[in-house]
Image (cartoon, rainbow, N blue to C red):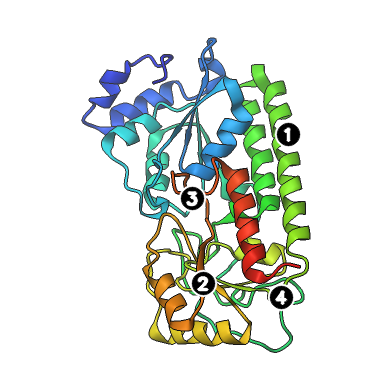
Amino acid sequence: MNARRLIPTATIAGAVTLGLVALSACSSSDAATKKSGNKLAVTASFYPMQFLAERIGGDHVSVTTLTKPGVEPHDLELNPRQVAQLGEADVILYLKGIQPAVDEAITQSGVKNTVDATSLTTLEKHGTEVGHSHEGGHADGHTAEESHPAGEEGSLDGKDPHIWLDPVKYAEVAKGVGASLEKADPDNSATYQKNTDALVKQLGGLDTAFKQGLADTTTKTFITTHAAFGYLAERYGLTQEAIAGLDPESEPSPARVKELETIAEHDKVGTVFFETLASDKTAKTIAADSGLKTDVLDPLEGITDKSKGDDYIEVMNSNLAALQKALGAK
């Protein structure tokens, strides 16, 4: 817990009303005035925000995540203690619209330094369950789903929140997070800038690896559990065909399942991807009915023992290898 608060942690955790927590946070919400040799207390909503905080903040931050490993972030509900902990943060990093419970709690927390990742880059619409056109292909790199959003997530009006799966957009978010940490803790701004530059460079290398690794493939179409990879597909000239919508728990219609079987045959799709934090039942059923293989394409909403890598960079490289294999990279 953050030892710099005037109200002890035990008192806050035991408070029966959110108002006491919010009052405590508001009375000391300027992080620059709270620094007294201790680490900056950063609360991240889920793994992609946690990774940025840890890599950019380094030894100068203490990072807490609201979404524990193995928990599907879209369905997160906060307990009273987590809500209280929000009020103790110096900086909160989150992605508006993907976790409604978190959005509401942040509004009530009274913390001044809140950073919404969606404000640091441009969001776009990527949907699912649309007619798949085979006319003219997708040479411009745009997915078939782009102009026909089929689901909404949070309050984003159908815009796709999965910006972290595009290394270029993620780098934009990283720059914004770095600037926010510099503002909250100017005494260590040089370190934050250095760490931001290093991470942006690494993400640039990841972008190059995806461009080169997916430049020449037998097919450009991949089937995945839910529509998390719209930005990645658009960035690298692929077509995402999702079984479900932006919400990984939504069920596909029988017509959509039949359509996917047709797409798989027409576009020479050999693999159906599933993910680590959501059910793989539908993906495996479609694969079995169509004689296709299955593999993992990780949306990186959390790191667990099942993840093919220990952090964002490693798992993204595993995703690249899986796509290269499935798409027939030459």
Q: How far is disc 4 from disc 2 in space, using C-alphas?
A: 16 Å
Dot 4 or dot 3: first in sequence order is 4
Q: How far is disc 1 from disc 4 in space, using C-alphas?
A: 34 Å
Name the amino acid type tagged 1: Ala
Mark 2 neighbour class, 10 Å CA radius: few under 14, some 14 to 19, many 20 or more: some
In this rendered view, identify the residue nearer to me: 211 or 33.
211
Q: Secondary structure at mark 2?
A: strand
Q: Position of residue 25 (x, y in %)?
A: 40, 26
| Residue drawn at point x = 58 percent, y = 48 percent | 315
Dot 3 or dot 2: first in sequence order is 2
**Is there any visible trace of residue 184 in the rendered image?**
no
Name the amino acid type tagged 4: Thr
Name the amino acid type tagged 3: Glu
Name the amino acid type tagged 2: Lys
Residue located beneath label 2 in the image: 293
Residue located beneath label 3 in the image: 301
Dot 4 or dot 2: first in sequence order is 4
Query: In the rendered view, would you say 42 is above or below 306?
Result: above
Query: In the rendered view, would you say 151 is above or below 48?
Result: below
Dot 1 or dot 4: first in sequence order is 1
**Is there any visible trace of residue 86 in the rendered image?**
yes
Dot 1 or dot 3: first in sequence order is 1
* Res. 86 image quadrant: top left
Q: How far is disc 1 from disc 2 in space, using C-alphas?
A: 38 Å
Q: Position of residue 302 (x, y in %)?
A: 47, 46
Q: Quadrant of the C terminus?
A: bottom right
Give the left or right position of residue 329, taking residue 244 as reference.
Answer: right
Q: Secondary structure at mark 3?
A: loop
Instruction: Say the numbered circle drawn on residue 218.
Output: 4
Q: Position of residue 43 (x, y in %)?
A: 46, 33
